């Protein structure tokens, strides 16, 4: 029996209370100076059920840095622009490596394993940027995210973007490596400037849950991409959305999700809902520790799973 909305609300309230009481909240990302300052005690969860009011608990109207969750939206844009030609430049396999690893890129001659590890996301952003300026590209991305969320009050945090431009040495290394293999079409500074700004989009959990609705396939949800593409993006989120912790997320939660080092996770319950959770402390994979725990509890209490 599906939970009623009041029952679901009680589950969300319990999850937020348990998170607040949790002693081990993980470790906030400190390699991006602006993220290192975020209070690890923040927590929010929001469930968007298309056609119904969004349910939420915790700081669900506090904006946070969505970081790699943005890669889902850029992937949708890139597929819209070049279709399956994207797969000539990036693969569709889990990497089993850290999000910023360069090892595989060397072994596999500059073709990143998937569009969600940093190297693959840089290629995806480079694809959207081709033939356009960074301003136009970021404008198109913001328009897409705002339309998906049905909310124009979504912006990029310039200070977070500049903070990554100043310290993102590994991403610069990845971009130059891609360039040396002929898999970067724009100057590394341009592609990375665009990528860092895309990662610096801020959204609240309520906004992010709504923005994910286009991936639920529920009639009445915003239709931003074809149903065929909805399925493919979900498949990639399931297999690659949590880097080398993707198997763990599939095992514990059983739903397609995409994490970001800001502590956000967007999870899709195909045919039912889109869920956003935010807890800034990360586990050793770089995925939100309590966010994953919260999603595991939500999946257990609701019975939501693709399996
Ligand atoms: N902007 C971050 C980076 O490139 C994104 C990583 C993430 O959120 O997992 O390092």
Image: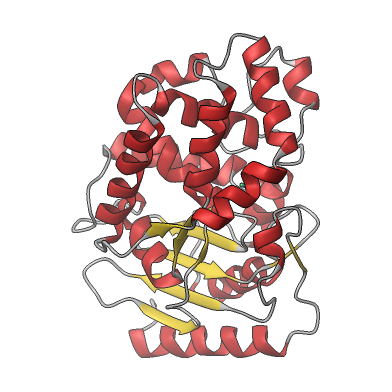
Q: Picture quarter containing residue 218? A: bottom left
Please indicate, yes or no, whether residue 256 appears anywhere in the rendered image.
no
Relative to 32, residue 195 above or below: above
Image position, residue 173 (x, y; %)? 73, 27
Relative to 136, residue 50 above or below: below
Relative to 215, residue 192 above or below: above
Q: Picture quarter containing residue 132? A: top left
Q: List the single residue furthest toward the left.
A: 220
Image position, residue 197 (x, y; %)? 49, 45
Which one is in front, 216 or 128? 128
| Residue at 22% from the left image edge and 47% from the top image edge | 223
Image position, residue 211 (x, y; %)? 35, 58
Q: Is residue 235 left or right of residue 271?
A: right
Image position, residue 40 (x, y; %)? 70, 76
Q: Is residue 178 left or right of residue 193?
A: right
Please indicate, yes or no, whether residue 181 appears anywhere in the rendered image.
yes
Which one is in front, 28 or 256? 28
Q: How is the image coloured?
A: secondary structure
| Residue at 33% from the left image edge and 51% from the top image edge | 145
Quadrant where the N terminus sits is: bottom left
Q: Is residue 54 left or right of residue 277?
A: left
Relative to 70, residue 131 above or below: above
């Amino acid at each position: 029996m599906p939970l009623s909305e009041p029952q679901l609300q009680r589950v969300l309230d319990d999850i937020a209370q348990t998170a607040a009481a949790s002693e081990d909240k993980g470790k906030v990302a400190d390699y991006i100076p602006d993220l290192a300052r975020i209070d690890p005690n923040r927590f929010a969860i929001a469930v968007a059920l298309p056609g119904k009011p969004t349910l939420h608990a915790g700081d669900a109207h506090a904006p946070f840095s969505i970081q790699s969750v943005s890669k889902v939206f850029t992937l949708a844009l890139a597929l819209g622009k070049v279709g399956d030609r994207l797969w000539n430049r990036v693969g569709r396999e889990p990497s089993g490596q850290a999000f910023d690893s360069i090892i595989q890129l060397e072994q596999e001659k500059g073709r990143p394993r998937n569009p969600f590890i940093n190297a693959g996301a840089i290629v995806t952003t480079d694809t959207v940027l081709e033939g356009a300026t960074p301003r136009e590209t970021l404008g198109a991305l913001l328009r897409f995210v705002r339309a998906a969320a049905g909310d124009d009050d979504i912006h990029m945090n310039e200070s977070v973007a500049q903070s990554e431009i100043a310290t993102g040495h590994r991403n610069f290394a990845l971009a130059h490596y891609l360039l040396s293999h002929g898999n970067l079409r724009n100057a590394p500074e341009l592609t990375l400037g665009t990528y860092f700004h895309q990662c610096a989009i801020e959204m609240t959990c309520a906004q992010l849950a709504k923005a994910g609705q286009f991936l639920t396939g529920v009639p009445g949800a915003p239709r931003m991409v074809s149903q065929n593409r909805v399925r493919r993006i979900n498949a990639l989120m399931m297999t690659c959305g949590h880097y080398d912790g993707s198997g763990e997320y599939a095992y514990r939660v059983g739903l397609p999700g995409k994490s970001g080092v800001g502590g956000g996770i967007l999870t899709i319950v195909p045919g039912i809902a889109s869920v956003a959770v935010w807890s800034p402390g990360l586990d050793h994979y770089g995925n939100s520790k309590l966010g994953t725990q919260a999603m595991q509890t939500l999946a257990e209490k609701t019975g939501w799973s693709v399996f």
